[in-house]
Amino acid sequence: MFTQQFELCKRILRTHFGPIVAQVATVLIHEGRLPLGLLAQKAGKTLRQTKESVAVLIQHGIATHASSKEGSRMATYYSISPRNVLRLERAGLYLALVEERMGKEGLAIFRVFMDNGPKRVLEFEAMASAKQIKFRQAVAKMVNERYITAVRAVDTVTKIDRLMAEERKELDKLMVPPTAKELKEIRARIKEREDEEYHNTAVIGIKRKAVSHEDSMDGGEAPEQQIDTVDEAMFFRPYCDRLDVFLRNQQITNYFADKYNAAAGAVIKTMLRLTESKTKTCRDKVSPTVSASQTAKGDGTSQGMTRKERAEIILALLEVLSSDSSGIVRKLEERGAGQFVIDFQLASNTLRNLCLDALVQEKFGALHARTVRILRDKQKLDEKVIAQSVMLPIGQCR
């Protein structure tokens, strides 16, 4: 880990949780996996303080744990991902995003989860200022759209340890030590199960409830309706991976709006909106395919135009965007209106490079930023070639 990243994590933890929790968390980040006794010794805190600090970190989804058998006893180790710590700095962006999309009620619910960590619905109904029926409907909507998600026991276990435990279970079923081929097949099955679970569209924590109205229009028995209700036994937490998708999509939209115009940004925003339901986290490298006709139907900004005119303009815009040097928008098929995808990996690289260019230009000036861009595009160059490309004397370039 870089020193700057470590220092940033330390300051974020101190701001959010205070000096005692920050000290324990800092030791975990610096040292890696540690048992409770050794963690208390290195942090210079009592065992009780260390236990309470680790409990706070696990409650807020920052720390994870794993148990392993050491001789005749089970030892529990704790670890922290710096990524989860740095994510705390986006809390304001998360709250603004939830307020924009879910309104004041959604913001009040989400703020309770951000402040207190995982909770059941019954535990914080009094904390959010809303009527019970309206409150339950808002929570159900947020769970359905994955702004918040149900907490499972495996969520607090380190991912690598979870996979290793599954592998041990498979190996225990064998009577003899596995061959290299069998071990490869076992790991392939585990990965297949993991991918299947990742792509599963079922929403955990929602129950369907049948509701019938007492009166019907024809005087007969009213048909039953299915409504979504929240499982009161489940704990819920903010689903930051999902919110990161929304923030990334917003940055991609701003990139095209700044580079081209507002219309290009609106088209990209519509494409991303159409694919949001199928994109769970930023782990996906490419968006699902979207046609120009689908984008035209979903675009509500082109008022006063016929459907045909709107489709032609959007198709022309998508053709222009697909020929952009960044390669973020790609056309897959030439038939008809064509199928388009957004390359999230290239988009992340482009946005990262823009951030680096702006930082270098702000700190060192335009000439240094141009030198960094040339080196990034051409990779390895000697001083003469760099000086010719940047149009500077060799001494100044050096």
Image: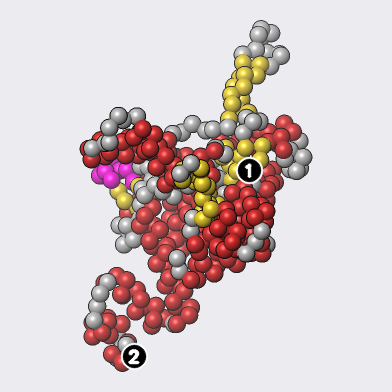
Q: Secondary structure at mark 2?
A: helix
- Residue 40, compared with residue 4, is above or below; it is above
Q: Does residue 22 belong to the magenta stretch?
A: no
Q: Amino acid at mark 1?
A: Pro
Main secondary structure of the magenta stretch: loop
Q: Residue at x 34, y 79 (%)?
A: 371
**Label 2 belongs to which residue?**
396
Q: Residue at x 29, y 70 (%)?
A: 377
- Residue 210, compared with residue 97, is above or below; it is above
Which of 53/18 is in front?
53
Residue 41 tag number:
none
Q: Amino acid at mark 2?
A: Gln
Which of 156/176 is in front?
176
Closer to viewer: mark 2 or mark 1 = 1
Task: Give coordinates of residue 86: x percent, y percent.
Answer: 54, 60
Q: Which of pointers 2 and 1 lies earlier in the amino acid sequence?
A: 1
Instruction: Choose top left, top right, bottom left or bottom right for residue 366.
Output: bottom left
**Label 1 belongs to which residue?**
118
Which of 177/5 is in front?
177
Which of 316/272 is in front?
272
Q: Residue at x 61, y 25 (%)?
A: 227
The residue carrying pointer 2 sits among few (fewer than 14), some (14 to 19) or many (20 or more) residues within 10 Å by Cα, namely few
Instruction: Give the magenta part as a residue range.
Output: 332-340
Q: Is residue 264 left or right of residue 336?
A: right
